[in-house]
Each structure stands twice: as structure tokens, then as C-alpha cells.
Image (spheres, rainbow, N blue to C red):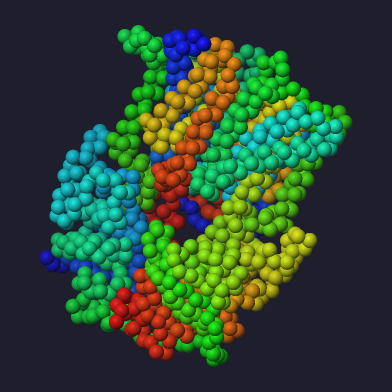
């Protein structure tokens, strides 16, 4: 009989920690070789087209950026929450909350100035996503309700709220399709690169990443949020108001995720519709974990996954390997990253035979 | 309005409710077995999708529906085993591991389906299960056609409610599962292998989740669509909490969910314009309320979410 | 009944180290059939560690164990239970949602084709209950039982498995007097049948009452072994705490100043809602070290937490520097000028994933000193940390090193540096040197005394009597939530302290 035994190991140096996500990506791509080979793909050709498809031409490169924008936002939102140990799995619902507000205000508000209209939309959507995340956070610290399950359920509540609106007040008149009318021109993100979909949301995402870094690193709130995440008991001992920090963290986290929804409505679709997000909220969890919960890591991880997602289309065309390989890679990456993090703290020893541990007696 | 009150309508709603409840029922029972042993399996949504895909593919290729169901159960067991390696033996976070498993299994299911079937204009179909009428009982008014003119898998799911109850509360294995879930240390000192018990529970649970998925593609529908599971796994997680980790109460929750789902479907079918999404929100709200009340009673298995590592105690 | 010549248990030369620090040193221990043997000693004397080795929890580094004459290798509690040894910890290994019968029989269930058959088990359980004078309902859920009844379930578990050796770790700590009498009767019945009991305790009168033989442990070594009939509580108290006075720490003499800490009528409950601190009065003056001794679990932890501001008292008041502090507010206590050294430095004191510099600013994170234009100024935060690292001799690669890479002694120095950097008027230290090597412990005590020389008041809560005697001006002893005795250090004997600690109040 083979037994696994975990032994604590001394802490790794900082450079090794930075290398963990890279090692995880490498291990993930190695593991993803199995389904690619099973699909009859040539490994080198497949990976070549995967990355060529994402980065090899101007159109694809810009498209990778377009896909990266919502991933950066949800990834930042999740990372910000996870840092404080608020297990926010609800980025998808918060994204939808933001999208609903963006769609509604984009249609309803007759504001002639685009700058003002967008500012109102962004502010309101941020708040909506933030409040939607604040409820599970409140339930967590007030009533000790498990945040993972509540945030997960809240995704579906928001999905059905959106459904009710799109089959009701927000539905395009004379249509039976669950889709809103087009938002006003003043509510649309400007496209920044001609003949592409490269829109305002992409620089906004980068700015958001910078702001998250600034909040984490340079403000008392960020410090307190990280302190609560590192050790809530010690933070409380040191006088940190843990409940209010958790609540503020949740609002920021949900607000960031909501920005992904705003981008999809105001830049990509120009309508509110049911299939707005192909699971950006859930991918955000993978992005945050792979990015080591660091804003720069989140940006890089988001670019990696958007590239894989865009590139998998090309790879599929050229090699016949189904493009869903990108979803497989995402799932694998999360599990691999988790194992990699375990290995930074533990050594896994494989022993044969039944328990022979014990003293030398 | 007469339409709504007719017996035929009632029968229709009830029949639909039981059908809609079945996949959730399988999944809820599977999740209960795992959680009673102390493991929250958030891989459930992906496990169901893999079950749905595998069941459909095997049935399509072999022409045997039951072979498809068996394959779905097998795949579910395999995924349960993977979950066990991650959270039982390696002691990784149950939350993140489960989500990772769901993402992975979801991607893999779609990948394999596309690999096997390509991208046809019309999705391929199988000849699905047909309702089986129970002699005599099926002729009861109103209830007969609803309850006793159902798929064999629906009857199976009903049988599983007492079966899982008996397993947990009347058998040696069940007593050990509950002990491991509540206090792994107590189990360890009386000679119960904590890791093995948890693993077996996850494997059994995975099988039920897989079958629940197969029901969707072999009975409820006759084809595989990428969003065929559509959050039913998460609903099962909710129903476990709602049902206070009891198979019977969890089943009741699943049925209630099916009823609301069935009602909105029938209302749509008769062309009544109701905001059916509002109906669909109700079970979630109820579950959140149930979680709030549960959080005060702390009736969840005490060992849930905690990895058990005896080795940590050594000096 | 002493017909079997082989001892039930023989442990020889047992040595166990935790991270190099010895907890047991060459301990010999034996248990005869029919005997109740008490293991007596202060906290940290190594009693529980020794028994955990016998129960298979810990592997010993050196030594051998024989059970019933046979040399064994205990790799797990399971292995010990198989050989008839069962330990009942203070935290019971029970499943609250299961019935008494289920808890007792699980792991050894009778079954038919996998289906449970309770008939025989129930009969056997009732028979055991009758023999040991218990009246538990086999179908009662364990969570509905009192703590004393739950302990009986634990004993029944051992009896059901025909254990021959029962180890009980502080079994009376959770019991009311009538339950203690029942427990003792049960243990006597058990021993009379040729079995053995190891009774871990530091309550002298109980030990005198129940045991046949007493083994005294001190600093991990056996210091005395007595037949109970040949000794008395006074002698045992001396044996338990030792007779030698530790060297006094040199200090410049000074006159005690105004009261820095005044505790009046303070009461507090523990995590289970039971009274832990009962109507306690205590005052510490500026420039004075008050050592608060006592066996753990007598309310010191709760008292410290109230003083730290992390536990709300149920009654009474705490004044720091003459002004009342808002109860249950860490911020208020910090603002009043109190430095706090928590008992568990990793769980309560530090954020292990954050850097040393970040840990050091926990309490003054809002101070203008560390901010520039509203934002945290990491340059100055690192400078501040660098200064403290030098002053307190913290061995670390630098201010940005994560706290988790430090050793225990250096972790405690980080806490000390954080707490003392603001020049406190009061220091509340709970077990400040527990688990540290001699050098680090000396440094920590020296640093605290320096503050005292500056005029700070120190309340030192410690289970290490040597530590208390070497630095305190006055010594108080806490027992069952109250201060049972307080005296100047030059007017007290170790024996007197030992008696107070054991609940023997003259």
C-alpha cells in the first residue's frame, strides 16, 4: 500500500514564489497535451497555432486584448476579495449586476455628454456590483453564513433577475427575444483603434489594476484588508475594525467585477442580453489564483487566458483540436496552481507499506 | 383561467415537476453522501456535465441507453476519485479544488463532445428513455399519469431516497461515514480509516451526480447541449443545506424546486405571460434563508471543509 | 488483585524534543495492574507529552515502551487502542450528533450483511453501565449530555473495547464535585479488576484522594516518586514547584509610582460561556513587576484577553493610567498606552504572510509618521522596521522579509518591538517566553525590565514559576478565576505558591 505523507518545509525564497505561476502554466500546458494528443493533434503544431492565433496578427492581438478586459476586471475583483479571505465566487453575478445597470442607464438616461453619461453609468454599476457583493459579506461576518455558497447562489439570483428584466421591462419592444434595445450612443465606450473592437475598457482595466495595486500597497484600507486576510484574529487584536474592512473589501471587489459587465454592454454588445458573459466571473477565479492575487499577476494571467481563448479558435481551424481546449486549460490551471501552492509549504513523501512511522523504540 | 385549474393542467405540472426534480435529486443525494463524510464537493456541476456528455455519447455510439447511464456513473466515480486525491489525500481547499474540478470537467465534456461529434448543424439525438407506466397505479386519476407514468430513472431516484437514508443511518458503513464527517479524530482512534472512508463516499456521490447528468441527455432531453446542466449542480448544493443534510428533506427540496420549475414551464406552455424568472429565484432565496437558520444551529457535519492530517500533530 | 507480576506499562528512557527543545528527558514510567498512578507537575512539566507518547500521538525520539511486557512501536492512537491503552483528553473525541450507543460502538459494530445490529451492543453497554454504576440512556444524543456525562461516554468507549490502561488528562477540570466523586468511584472499580489508571493532574487534594502512587515531573524529568500513603499535600507542593530560587534579575532600585493598572470586580466568561474570571481585583503600579502565577485554565487567558481588549468582561472595570477604558476595544487599550504580548504569538500576535515591516506598524498604521500625502510611505515604514530590527536584535534578512520565515524567538522579538516601540506605561505579557530558547527568553525578560526601569508597570502572566520569581516584585496566584494570594517576592516561599496554585488556601 502506498501512502502519501505531507511534511512542512522551510519557507521558499521570494524568487521561487514568483516562479510558481510560471511553473504552474508550464505544468498545465504539459497536462493539456493529453487531450490534444487524444484529439489527434500534433503537439508542436497545436501549441504553435494556439499562440500564433492569439498573438500572430494585429487583429488577433487586439481581439486578445478585448477578451482580456473583462477577465482583468473579474480577476482583480476576485483577487481583492481573496486577499482579505472573503471567498467571493460571485463575480459572475456582480458582473451581471453591473451589466444590468449599464444597460438600463444606457437606454434610459438622456444625457447628451458622453463623458458624463459614461461616468454616471460606471459609478452606478460599480455601486450595484459592490452592494451585490456586500450582502454575502455581511451575512458572513454577522451571521457566519458560508460565503462561498452564498456568492455562488447569488450568481443565479442575479441571472434570473436579469432574465425577468429582459423578458419584462428591459425587453426590446415587439421582440420575443430576451434582449434589450440598443443603448444610446453616448453610453457606448469609444473604440480606440480603428478597424477593431479595441475599446476604452481595456485601458480602464489596466488603470484599475494600477489602482488596486495602489490601494493594497499604499492605503490604510488596503493594509487592513490584507491584514484581515493574513490573520483576522491578529488584525482584530491590533485594532483593525475587521467587519467594516470586510464590507469595504466586498464593495470594491464586487464593483470591479461589475466593470466587466459594463464593458460587455457598453463596448462589445451595445445591448443587454442573457449570454453576455461566457463565464468571465468564474474564469476570474482562475485568473486571480494564477496571478497569485497580485494585480500585475492578474493582468498577465488574464492576457494568458484570453490569448489561449482566442488562439484556440485558430488552433481548432488548423489542427481540428476542439477550441474547448481553452476551457480545459483553465480548469487544469486552477487545480495545478493549487497543488503548486501546496508544494511551496509541504513536501509530499510517498511511502510504501503500512504505517511504520513512530519512535526508534 | 379555466385552463389553469383543469385536472389535466395539474397533472401536467406535477409530471413536469417530478421530471425536473430528478436530476437535482440524484445530485443532491450524491452530494449528501460526500458532505456527511466531511467533504463539500463543488465539482458537482462539472461532474453532472461529464455524466450528461458521457451518457449521451455512449448511448449514441452503442445504442444502449442503460450502458450510457452506467458509463455516466463510472465517469462520476472517476471524478469523485480525483476530488478525493485533491482534498482528502493532499488536503487542498475543498472550495477551490471543487471549483477547479467543475471548470476542468466542464471544459473536458465540451471538448470530448466536439471531438466525437464535430459541429453538425443539427445536434445529434438519441431515442430517449420512454415513460414506463406502473400497472394499475398509472390509472389513478390525476396522480396516476403524473407519478406512475414516468421514466425508469425517475423511479430509481425515488428508490434512492430511502436507500441513501438506510445507507447512512442503518448500516455500518453509514455510521462510519457520519463519524468521519463529524469528528475524524474520534473515527481514527477507533480504527476507522478516515481517508478511505471519505474517498469511498466521494466516489459513491460522484456516481449519483453522473447519473443525474445522464438523465438530462437521455430522458429529459434527447441531445447534449453545452448548457444542459445549467446550474443544477449548484442547486443541489443548495438543496443539501436546505434539507439539513437529510436525504428525505433534501429530496423534498429538490421536488419543490422541480415544482416551481414545472409550473413556470407549463405556464409558458399555455401561453400565459408570467415573469417565470421570479419563480426560479424563490428556491435560491429560500436556500439563503435556510443557510442563515442553519448557521445558528450549526447542524452541518462538524468536520466539513477540514482536511484530516494526523501527521500534523507529530512534533 | 495484584496477581499479575508483569507491569501493564513500562516506559524506559523516554526522550522527546519539539524543535530541539526537550519536553521529556530520559523518563522512566511504569504502571502495575490494579494501580491508580497520578502524574503530577506544573504546566509544561511534560506530563501530557509523556502520555501522548504512550497513546501513539507523538513518536518519542529515544526510549522504549513495553505494554504487558511486550515491546511495542506505537505509530498511531489506533495502535495504542488495539493494545488496550486509551487516553481521554480534555477535548473529548465524541460525535455530538450520534447517540451514546453509536459513539461507544462505532468501529466495533455488530452487523448483519452490513446492516447494523444493535441488540448485542446495547446489552453489553447496559451491562457495563450497571457494573460501573452509570445510568446513561444508550439512545440519548451526545450533544444533549452534560460534560460529566460525556466523559462517562468516553470511559464507556474504553471499557467497551476492554482497555486495560486508562489515561485521563485533567479529568476533573470540567466536573462539578458530585461528578468527581462518581468518577473516582468508577476509576477505583476499574482498577480493582486488574487494570491500570494514569491520572494527570495538578490538584493536590484530588491526587491524594484517588491515587496509589504519585510520580512528579518537573522540566521534563521525573523528580520524585512516592506512595500516596507516605506523603502529604505540603510535601507534594514542594516537589512539584521545586525548592531552588532562581537568580534574581539585577535591576536598578526605584520607588513604585502611581497605579498604572487597576482592575476592580472583574468577571468574564470563557468561550463556552462559563465563568472564568470571578470578581477579580488587582492593581499594578508604575515601575513594578507583578507576577501572576497559576496553573493554566484558571482564568488567566480570559483575564489577559479582557486586558488586551479582545474579550468583553461581564462585570467590573479596568482603568489604565487612572482612566477607565472602553471594554472590548483593542483600540482603546492601545490608545491608553498599554503594550500587549499575547499568549499565542502566531495565532493572535502576527500576520505571518505579511512582512516584518508591515507587522510592526499594525497598531500605529494611521500615524502621520508613516504617511505622505495620505498614502503609506513604505520608505519610512522600512526605516522604522530597520531601526527596531537593530534595537531588538531580530535575525532577519531585512524589513521586507515575511514574518513566517522567522524563528519563534525572533517572532516574539517582532511582537515585543511593536509593542514597546511606543514607550508604553503598562505591559501586559501572557506567557512571553513560552517555547523559546534560553537566550531569547533572557533577552525578552531583560527588555521588559528595561521598560520597567523607565517607569512602566508590568503584569507578567506566566506558568513558569522560575520566571515569575526571577523578575517579579510581587507575586499573585490565580485559582479558579480569583486571586487567592498575593505577597511581596521576598516574603514568600515556593511551597506557599505551590499550595495556592493547587487550590489549598490556608
> From the viewer's perspective, is B95 left or right of A256?
left
A243 is higher (above) or lower (below) than B27: below
Where in the figure is residue A334, as x and y percent of width and height?
60, 41
Q: Looking at the image, which is closer to me, A197 or B192?
A: A197
To which quarter of the image does residue A336 belong? top right
> From the viewer's perspective, is B100 left or right of C1?
right
C483 is higher (above) or lower (below) than B284: below
Where in the figure is residue C390, as x and y percent of width and height?
66, 75
Q: Residue at x 31, y 36 (%)?
A: B169
Q: Quadrant of the C terminus of chain B?
A: bottom left
Q: Residue at x 58, y 19 (%)?
A: B274
> From the viewer's perspective, is C374 left or right of A148?
right
> From the viewer's perspective, is A358 left or right of A122?
left
Whether residue C426 appears in this view of the structure is: no
B115 is higher (above) or lower (below) than C96: above
To which quarter of the image does residue A225 belong? bottom right
Where in the figure is residue C110, as x and y percent of width and height?
23, 40
Q: Residue furthest right?
A: A194
Where in the figure is residue A11, as x and y percent of width and height?
59, 59
Q: Residue at x 24, y 61 (%)?
A: C179
Q: Residue furthest bottom?
A: C253
B61 is higher (above) or lower (below) than C271: above
Q: Residue at x 40, y 85 (%)?
A: C487
Whether residue A154 appears in this view of the structure is: yes
Q: Looking at the image, which is closer to me, C410 or A32?
A: C410
In the rendered picture of this protein, how many numbered marks are placed on residues? 0
Amino acid at each position: 500500500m502506498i501512502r502519501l505523507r505531507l511534511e512542512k518545509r522551510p519557507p521558499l525564497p521570494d524568487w521561487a514564489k514568483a516562479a510558481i505561476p510560471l511553473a504552474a502554466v508550464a505544468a498545465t500546458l504539459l497536462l493539456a497535451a493529453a487531450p490534444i494528443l487524444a484529439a489527434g493533434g500534433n503537439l508542436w503544431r497545436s501549441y504553435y497555432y494556439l499562440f500564433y492565433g492569439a498573438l500572430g496578427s494585429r487583429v488577433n492581438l487586439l481581439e486578445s486584448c478585448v477578451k482580456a478586459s473583462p477577465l482583468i476586471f473579474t480577476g482583480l475583483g476576485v483577487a481583492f476579495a481573496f486577499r482579505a479571505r472573503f471567498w467571493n465566487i460571485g463575480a459572475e453575478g456582480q458582473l451581471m449586476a453591473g451589466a444590468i445597470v449599464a444597460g438600463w442607464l444606457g437606454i434610459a438616461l438622456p444625457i447628451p455628454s458622453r463623458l458624463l453619461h459614461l461616468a454616471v453609468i460606471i459609478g452606478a454599476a460599480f455601486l450595484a456590483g459592490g452592494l451585490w457583493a456586500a450582502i454575502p459579506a455581511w451575512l458572513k461576518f454577522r451571521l457566519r453564513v458560508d460565503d462561498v455558497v452564498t456568492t455562488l447562489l447569488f450568481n443565479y439570483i442575479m441571472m434570473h433577475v436579469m432574465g425577468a428584466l429582459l423578458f419584462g421591462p428591459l425587453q426590446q419592444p415587439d421582440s420575443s427575444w430576451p434582449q434589450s434595445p440598443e443603448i444610446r450612443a453616448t453610453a457606448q465606450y469609444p473604440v480606440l483603434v480603428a478597424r477593431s473592437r479595441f475599446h476604452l475598457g481595456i485601458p480602464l482595466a489596466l488603470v484599475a489594476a494600477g489602482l488596486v495595486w495602489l490601494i493594497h500597497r499604499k492605503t490604510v484600507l488596503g493594509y487592513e484588508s490584507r491584514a484581515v486576510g493574513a490573520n483576522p484574529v491578529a488584525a482584530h487584536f491590533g485594532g483593525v475594525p475587521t467587519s467594516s474592512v470586510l464590507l469595504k473589501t466586498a464593495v470594491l471587489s464586487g464593483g470591479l467585477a461589475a466593470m466587466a459587465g459594463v464593458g460587455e454592454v457598453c463596448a462589445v454588445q451595445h445591448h443587454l442580453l442573457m449570454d453576455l458573459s461566457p463565464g468571465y466571473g468564474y474564469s476570474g477565479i482562475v485568473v486571480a489564483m494564477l496571478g497569485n492575487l497580485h494585480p500585475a499577476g492578474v493582468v498577465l494571467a488574464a492576457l494568458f487566458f484570453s490569448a489561449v481563448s482566442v488562439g484556440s479558435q485558430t488552433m481548432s481551424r488548423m489542427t481540428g483540436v476542439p477550441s474547448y481546449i481553452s476551457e480545459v486549460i483553465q480548469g487544469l490551471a486552477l487545480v495545478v496552481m493549487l497543488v503548486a501552492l501546496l508544494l511551496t509549504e509541504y513536501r509530499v513523501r510517498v511511502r510504501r507499506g503500512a504505517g511504520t512511522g513512530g519512535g526508534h523504540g | 383561467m379555466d385552463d389553469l385549474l383543469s385536472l389535466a393542467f395539474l397533472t401536467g405540472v406535477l409530471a413536469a415537476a417530478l421530471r425536473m426534480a430528478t436530476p437535482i435529486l440524484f445530485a443532491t443525494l450524491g452530494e449528501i453522501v460526500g458532505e456527511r463524510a466531511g467533504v463539500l464537493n463543488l465539482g458537482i456541476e462539472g461532474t453532472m456535465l461529464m455524466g450528461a456528455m458521457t451518457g449521451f455519447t455512449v448511448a449514441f455510439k452503442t445504442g444502449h441507453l442503460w450502458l450510457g447511464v452506467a458509463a455516466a456513473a463510472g465517469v462520476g466515480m472517476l471524478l469523485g476519485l480525483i476530488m478525493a486525491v485533491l482534498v482528502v489525500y493532499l488536503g487542498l481547499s475543498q472550495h477551490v479544488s471543487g471549483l477547479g474540478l467543475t471548470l476542468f470537467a466542464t471544459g473536458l465534456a465540451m471538448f470530448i463532445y466536439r471531438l466525437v461529434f464535430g459541429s453538425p448543424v443539427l445536434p445529434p439525438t438519441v431515442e430517449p428513455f420512454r415513460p414506463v407506466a406502473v400497472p394499475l397505479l398509472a390509472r389513478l386519476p390525476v396522480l396516476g399519469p403524473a407519478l406512475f407514468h414516468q421514466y425508469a430513472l425517475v423511479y430509481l431516484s425515488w428508490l434512492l431516497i430511502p436507500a441513501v437514508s438506510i445507507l447512512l443511518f442503518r448500516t455500518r458503513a453509514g455510521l462510519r461515514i457520519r463519524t468521519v464527517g463529524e469528528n475524524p479524530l474520534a473515527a481514527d482512534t477507533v480504527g476507522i480509516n478516515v481517508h478511505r472512508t471519505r474517498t469511498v463516499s466521494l466516489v459513491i456521490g460522484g456516481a449519483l451526480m453522473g447519473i443525474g447528468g445522464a438523465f438530462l441527455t437521455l430522458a429529459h432531453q434527447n441531445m447534449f447541449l453545452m448548457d444542459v446542466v445549467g446550474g443544477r449542480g449548484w442547486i443541489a448544493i443548495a438543496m443539501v443545506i436546505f434539507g439539513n443534510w437529510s436525504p428525505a428533506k433534501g429530496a423534498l427540496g429538490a421536488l419543490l424546486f422541480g415544482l416551481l420549475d414545472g409550473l413556470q414551464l407549463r405556464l409558458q406552455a399555455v401561453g400565459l405571460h408570467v415573469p417565470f424568472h421570479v419563480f426560479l429565484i424563490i428556491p435560491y432565496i429560500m436556500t439563503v434563508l435556510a443557510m442563515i437558520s442553519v448557521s445558528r444551529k450549526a447542524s452541518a457535519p462538524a468536520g466539513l471543509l477540514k482536511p484530516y492530517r494526523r501527521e500534523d500533530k507529530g512534533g | 488483585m495484584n496477581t499479575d507480576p508483569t507491569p501493564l506499562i513500562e516506559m524506559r528512557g523516554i526522550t522527546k524534543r519539539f524543535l530541539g527543545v526537550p519536553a521529556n528527558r530520559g523518563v522512566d514510567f511504569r504502571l502495575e495492574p490494579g494501580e491508580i498512578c497520578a502524574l503530577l507537575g506544573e504546566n509544561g512539566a511534560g506530563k501530557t507529552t509523556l502520555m501522548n507518547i504512550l497513546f501513539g500521538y507523538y513518536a518519542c525520539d529515544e526510549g522504549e515502551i513495553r505494554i504487558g511486557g511486550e515491546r511495542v512501536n506505537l505509530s498511531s492512537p489506533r495502535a495504542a487502542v488495539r493494545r488496550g491503552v486509551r487516553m481521554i483528553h480534555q477535548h473529548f473525541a465524541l460525535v455530538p450528533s450520534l447517540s451514546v450507543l453509536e459513539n461507544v460502538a462505532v468501529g466495533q459494530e455488530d452487523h448483519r450483511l452490513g446492516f447494523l445490529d444493535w441488540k448485542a451492543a446495547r446489552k453489553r453497554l447496559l451491562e457495563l453501565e450497571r457494573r460501573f454504576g452509570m445510568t446513561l440512556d444508550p439512545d440519548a444524543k451526545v450533544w444533549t449530555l452534560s460534560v460529566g456525562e460525556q466523559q462517562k461516554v468516553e470511559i464507556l468507549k474504553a471499557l467497551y473495547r476492554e482497555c486495560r490502561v486508562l489515561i485521563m488528562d485533567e479529568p476533573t477540570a470540567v466536573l462539578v464535585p458530585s461528578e468527581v466523586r462518581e468518577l473516582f468511584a468508577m476509576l477505583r472499580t476499574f482498577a480493582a479488576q486488574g487494570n491500570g489508571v494514569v491520572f494527570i493532574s495538578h490538584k493536590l487534594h484530588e491526587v491524594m484522594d484517588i491515587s496509589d502512587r504519585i510520580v512528579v515531573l518537573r522540566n521534563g524529568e521525573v523528580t520524585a516518586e512516592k506512595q500516596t500513603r507516605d506523603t502529604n499535600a505540603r510535601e507534594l507542593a514542594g516537589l512539584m514547584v521545586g525548592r531552588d530560587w532562581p537568580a534574581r534579575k539585577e535591576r536598578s532600585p526605584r520607588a513604585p509610582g502611581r497605579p498604572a493598572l487597576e482592575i476592580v470586580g472583574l468577571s468574564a466568561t470563557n468561550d463556552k460561556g462559563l465563568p472564568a474570571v470571578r470578581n477579580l481585583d488587582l492593581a499594578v503600579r508604575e515601575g513594578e513587576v507583578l507576577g501572576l502565577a497559576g496553573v493554566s485554565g484558571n482564568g488567566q487567558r480570559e483575564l489577559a484577553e479582557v486586558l488586551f481588549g479582545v474579550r468583553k468582561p461581564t462585570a467590573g472595570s479596568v482603568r489604565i493610567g487612572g482612566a477607565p477604558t472602553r471594554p472590548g476595544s483593542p483600540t482603546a487599550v492601545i490608545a491608553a498606552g498599554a503594550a500587549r504580548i499575547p499568549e499565542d504569538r502566531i495565532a493572535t500576535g502576527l500576520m505571518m504572510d505579511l512582512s516584518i515591516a508591515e507587522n510592526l506598524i499594525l497598531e500605529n498604521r494611521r500615524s502621520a509618521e508613516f504617511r505622505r500625502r495620505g498614502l503609506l510611505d513604505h520608505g519610512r515604514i522600512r526605516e522604522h522596521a530597520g531601526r527596531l530590527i537593530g534595537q531588538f536584535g531580530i535575525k532577519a534578512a531585512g524589513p521586507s522579509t515575511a514574518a513566517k520565515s522567522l524563528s519563534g524567538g525572533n517572532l516574539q522579538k517582532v511582537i515585543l518591538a511593536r509593542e514597546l516601540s511606543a514607550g508604553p506605561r503598562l505591559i501586559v505579557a501572557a506567557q512571553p517566553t513560552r517555547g523559546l530558547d534560553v537566550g531569547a527568553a533572557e533577552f525578552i525578560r531583560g527588555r521588559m525590565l528595561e521598560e520597567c526601569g523607565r517607569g512602566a508597570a508590568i503584569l507578567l502572566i506566566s506558568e513558569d514559576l522560575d520566571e515569575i520569581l526571577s523578575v517579579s516584585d510581587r507575586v499573585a496566584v490565580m485559582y479558579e478565576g480569583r486571586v487567592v494570594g498575593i505577597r511581596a517576592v521576598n516574603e514568600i516561599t515556593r511551597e506557599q505558591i505551590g499550595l495556592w496554585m493547587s487550590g489549598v488556601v490556608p
